[in-house]
Amino acid sequence: MSALLPLLFGLFGLLLLLLRSRKRRDGEPPLINGWIPFIGKALHFGKDAHKFLEEYKKKYGDVFTVHIAGKYMTFIMDPHLYPSIIRQGRQLDFHEFTGKVAPLTFGYKPVQSDLWEKIRRSFQLLQGDNLQPLTGSMMSNLILVFRQDHLDHGLWRSSSMYDFCSSVMFEATFLTIYGRPAAALRHSDMEALREDFNKFDNMFPLLIAQVPIWLLGQTSAIRKKLIHYFLPERLSRFSNTSEFIKTRVGLFEQESSMKDVDKGAHHFAMLWASVGNTLPATFWAMYFLVSHPEALQTVRREILDVLRDDGVEFSTDSDVKLSKEQLDKLIYLESSINESLRLSSASTNIRVVQEDFSLRLDASRAISVRKGDIIALYPQSMHLDPEIYEDPQTFQFDRFVQDGAEKTDFYKDGQKLRYYLMPFGSGSSMCPGRYFAVNEIKQFLSLLLLYFELELEEGQPRPALDPSRAGLGILLPSTDIRFRYRLRANEA
Ligand code: HEM
Ligand SMILES: *[C@@H]1O[C@H](CO)[C@@H](O)[C@H](O)[C@H]1NC(C)=O
Ligand SMILES: *[C@@H]1O[C@H](CO)[C@@H](O)[C@H](O)[C@H]1NC(C)=O
């Protein structure tokens, strides 16, 4: 697959060699054209987006335009300027982008704006009071999955960490959101589904780059299979389906012109949204805790203390259920998760310029932008800025805790930052599943830390971030990690 990408860009590049790049106009930011038209800096960018942007920041300052894969992207690098972009609603639009790219990627027909509005409203069912039943259901499902596969005896078992996390979280998340398939659910069915999902997921960056799916080998057939898994007549036989999915099913039912395959494709897209970032995020949080035993001990103690305050003595013989309120109290755990997200997230926040206009950045500065251009924030540069986060590559589990409460003051150039952690995007395009996501990662880690002793196997360096989906979300580790675990003996 990695050989395919340069080849494709090469072909398109040759094809468009005759197209002239544009010239910078008055009031526009510095313009960086690739030396091959169209390919622009795409290859360079894909290799290591963070390094690439840092280099240009040094040369051209905080705001510059780069010609990437046929698009002109203006990067706003100074996080003090983020609010001016995030607040801008009318002339910078987010959904023009997802409205085109998501249908091609997941294989549904572009959505009319009135249906889109209804879909957006259904995201409420992942938040607020609706989180309560989802949290309860996720807890039961996690315990079920742990019991069926991992809680059987007290001997040490050796496993690969990414595979372990993804297997448990995929199954438990699926059961919580979609419910239980009609046929008696077997672990092996879920693993087969996950395998297909992974094959699709590996091609995800290329699909998002709008490489035609027929160029990607088996991907089209696999996507078809995944979509069929969620066809209405199958989904209607699932039990314990969440209100969120039931509502979406109802919405699509009312659309008389919508085909069943399009409905299936929407449900499949939601599967991607609900696990695509969650699985790697869970891996990094688990990896950093297991590789920092002092942090793990503090977090484990915090969980035991919260349980004890509510009169629960934990024992490995019985199921422990942490409520939403209890999870909210776990601030060292939350800080550890946030710290893992800081170290692994590489999403781009994208807005499409709706008309030529002058975009005000702060009191003293405005830039001219052109219709169709993209304004991009790349928070990874902020997350790894040594001026904001001392020793930015180090995992400090309590980085987001101060005096026993959440720490919210982070500075750059002596000025407090409005935004300092953005793994879930920003403003109108912010991830609607963020509360559920953090909750379920907390639940997974709580059970893991309570029930198991955990150790890394010797001689493994910290895995690097695999850059192949830079710009799209949480990065995967470039290698998996071996670890050991065993059920804890009860403490006296
Ligand atoms: C750690 C886990 C997760 C991360 C880091 C994450 C991150 C993101 C990001 C960066 C975006 C795009 C925002 C933008 O482009 O500005 C997004 C969108 C979205 N996420 Fe998440 N997400 C996670 C988990 C989830 C979960 C568990 C769900 C659902 C149960 C979910 C549902 C969605 C949906 C539906 C969208 C599209 C929203 C829209 O189009 O307006 N996400 N997520
Ligand atoms: C379905 O949900 C109910 C309550 O929401 C729960 O009591 C029951 O155990 C669940 N059944 C299955 C098979 O998960
Ligand atoms: C963790 O980050 C989220 C935003 O991503 C924030 O809402 C939450 O308050 C943070 N918690 C801590 C302890 O920093």
Image (cartoon, grey):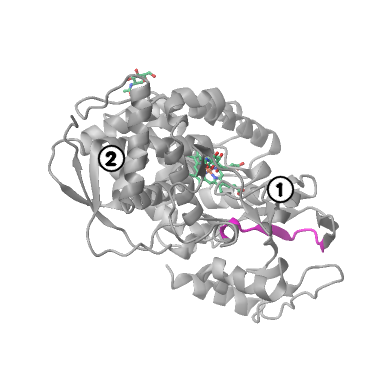
Q: Which quadrant of the figure shows ligand 1?
A: top right
Which three-letter amino acid code belongs to the residue tagged 2?
Asp
Residue at the (68%, 39%) spot, across then down: 112
Which mark, residue 360?
none
Look at discs 1 and 2 and give the one toward the viewer: 1
Q: Is residue 144 left or right of residue 131?
A: left
- Residue 365, percent from left and from top: 83, 60
Which three-letter amino acid code belongs to the residue tagged 1?
Ile
Number of other residues with Cα within 10 Å of mark 1, as a class: few under 14, some 14 to 19, many 20 or more: some
Which mark, residue 86?
1
The answer to which quarter of the image holds residue 363 is bottom right
Q: Which residue is mark 2?
A: 189
Q: Is residue 237 visible?
A: no
The answer to which quarter of the image holds residue 154 is top left
Q: Is residue 409 left or right of residue 474?
A: right
Which segment did they paint magenta?
368-380
Residue at the (21%, 30%) spot, across then down: 316
User: Residues under labels 1 and 2: Cα distance?
Assistant: 42 Å
Quadrant placement of the C terminus: top left
- Residue 385, percent from left and from top: 57, 61
Q: Nearer the viewer, residue 323 or 403?
A: 403
Check residue 107 for magenta coloring.
no
Q: Is residue 40 left or right of residue 406?
A: right
Residue at the (25%, 36%) spot, across then down: 451
- Residue 299, percent from left and from top: 37, 40
Q: Element at badge 1?
A: helix
Number of other residues with Cα within 10 Å of mark 2, as a class: few under 14, some 14 to 19, many 20 or more: few
